[in-house]
Amino acid sequence: MREPTLNRRQVLGIGGALGLMAAVGLSTAATLSRRPSVTGTELRSAVPLPPAFRTPLPLPSVLKPVSTSGGVDRYEMTQRQAKLEILPGVRTPMWTYEGTFPGPTIESRRGRPITVTHRNELPVPTVVHLHGGRSTPASDGYPTDLVLPQGWQDPAHGMSGTQQMTGMHGMSGAHEMHDPRAVVTRLTRDYSFPMDQRPTLLWYHDHRMDFTAPAIWRGLAGLQIVRDDAEDALGLPAGPRELPLMIADRAFTRDGNLCYPALDPSLREQPGVREAYLSGVLGDVILVNGAPWPVHEVDAARYRLRILNASNARHYELEAVTDDGRRLDLVQVGADQGLLAAPVTHRFLPIAPAERYDVIVDFAGVPVGSSVRILNRLGSGHTRDVMAFRVARRAADHSRVPRVLAHDLPTWRRSDAARVRDFSFRAGRMRGGHGWLIGGQPFDPARTDVTVRLGDVEVWRLVADVHHPVHLHLVGFRVLSRSGRAPLPHDAGLKDTISLRPGEAAEIITRFDGYHGRYLFHCHNAEHEDMGMMANLEII
């Protein structure tokens, strides 16, 4: 299919608007790919903001199963509105899982199935996706498999959600899209996960068609950790020295509410954001586990940081800096889909929306009483700071970082590929408005975009106009190349999200194993996803 002719307008940098670029010249692309910029426009908070590194780092609670009988762990989770103290002394209305942000963490074991019953007490339909999970199609959180709140009525037609509300798409007003394969339930839904996958950090979030971005922004995100005996035996830092860190940016109104430029603040009818924010929404407050620029007291020992970028559109490049200006090593032991074969040491770690990195930081050489700041090299002003660690005491440390971490990574070769496919991720026109397209087309749940055979290995070549973190559901992949060159150091291991830089072409390789059925691949800039940058993948 030929892609539409597009205007060219630069989108990069804070304050940038949507760029419509049908093609990027080679020299321009090379320049942009080296520029430490972001795709999106920053909102400015109107409420007074607290100083950095004063708020204690919260740790998400761990959800307890309601049943463990029959070899299955069963959980219950309610999606509901709550007022939370995100900024000190300010109550902020949010949409939550179990009344907290982030939602409670689910601890799971490899090979032991779990079922999570979600109850929707929010004012709009929801969908839950376990990002990085090897899920059956019925539990993958397809965007039109809605859970309707009690008494839901479609505001456009006055009919029940079951009859009409299977999603609306298009930036020039509501545009109905019926999905004949949608499975819609009312009030509750059971999501079942076999947990037949490598130990890693996953996250769950809302995935409702056209409204994913504002729902995540309002608080619908939480963590899930998969563990197994082999990883437990490695001797990596554990217990209080293993810290989950969900990094997300937000902005606040004068009265402490979350600020988001939705065309329909009720999130009921018209999807999309105001024109200036079509490239992505950025906040000026950096939250870690729901706290602004927090601080955490640590021993002078190794710590395992399980880092997730849960921002809608903001990219980070993280560094750990001591009070005297030294940079500490960031020793990567895992990626999106679990442990690396061997550790990789970084001084700076870029992380795009939805990416996860498993990192060891050693505070042993830091003087007691001093601090280590985690900074964002892509930020400025408030968004330069992320969080801090305060070294409180000397302590024994029996942890280690083995030279060999895992033996079970796939060894797919290019010669194993049954086929090679090409996909472009670019801005374009859709239904009279601006949107973001894959292969020149916006998302349509009624269309099958790619059909693959179960068990086949494929190479996909991905090309971007601006920053696009591309996520594949169900499968992990390895990065083969970037713009004809070797992968970058942070591409190591098995991933499910790759950060495409402006003008870049990357190759990935994967095997489509697991289950037959319908899945997705899409950009995880959440505003891009809502505005069409998503496609259907059918495994036969």
Image (cartoon, rainbow, N blue to C red):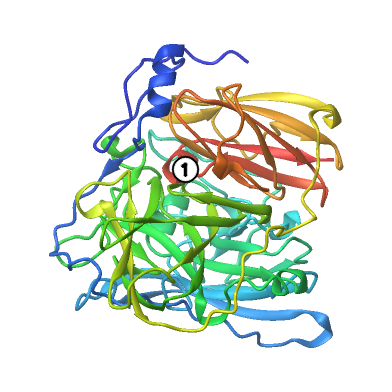
Q: Decide: is 4 above or below 294.
A: above
Image x and y of residue 237, in percent: 57, 73
Whether residue 454 appears in this view of the structure is yes
Query: At 22% across and 76% down in the image, what residue appears?
Result: 88
Image x and y of residue 180, in percent: 69, 45
Image x and y of residue 531, in percent: 45, 37
Residue sitting nearer the eye, 94 or 329: 329
Q: Decide: is 403 above or below 93.
A: above
Q: State the SS at label 1.
A: helix
Structural crowding at the residue carrying mark 1, measured as other residues with C-alpha within 10 Å and reported as few (<14), some (14–19) or many (≥20): many
Q: Is 228 positioned to the left or the right of 208 in the image?
A: right
Please state, as top left, top right, bottom left or bottom right, where the C terminus lies in the image. top right
Q: Which image quarter: residue 417?
A: top right
Image x and y of residue 277, in percent: 30, 39
Q: Is 170 positioned to the left or the right of 35 in the image?
A: right
Report the number of discs.
1
Residue sitting nearer the eye, 116 or 31: 31
Q: Decide: is 524 above or below 62.
A: above
Q: Which image quarter: residue 363?
A: bottom left
Please state, as top left, top right, bottom left or bottom right, where the N terminus lies in the image. top right
Residue sitting nearer the eye, 437 or 321: 321
Query: At 70% across and 74% down in the image, what residue appears?
Result: 232
Whether residue 25 appears in this view of the structure is no
Q: Which image quarter: residue 296?
A: bottom left
Query: At 37% across and 65% down in the image, what residue appears?
Result: 288
Query: At 61% across and 29% down in the image, what residue appears?
Result: 486
Q: Kindly identify the amino acid type of the residue bearing the numbered disc 1.
A: Asp
Label 1 sits on residue: 530
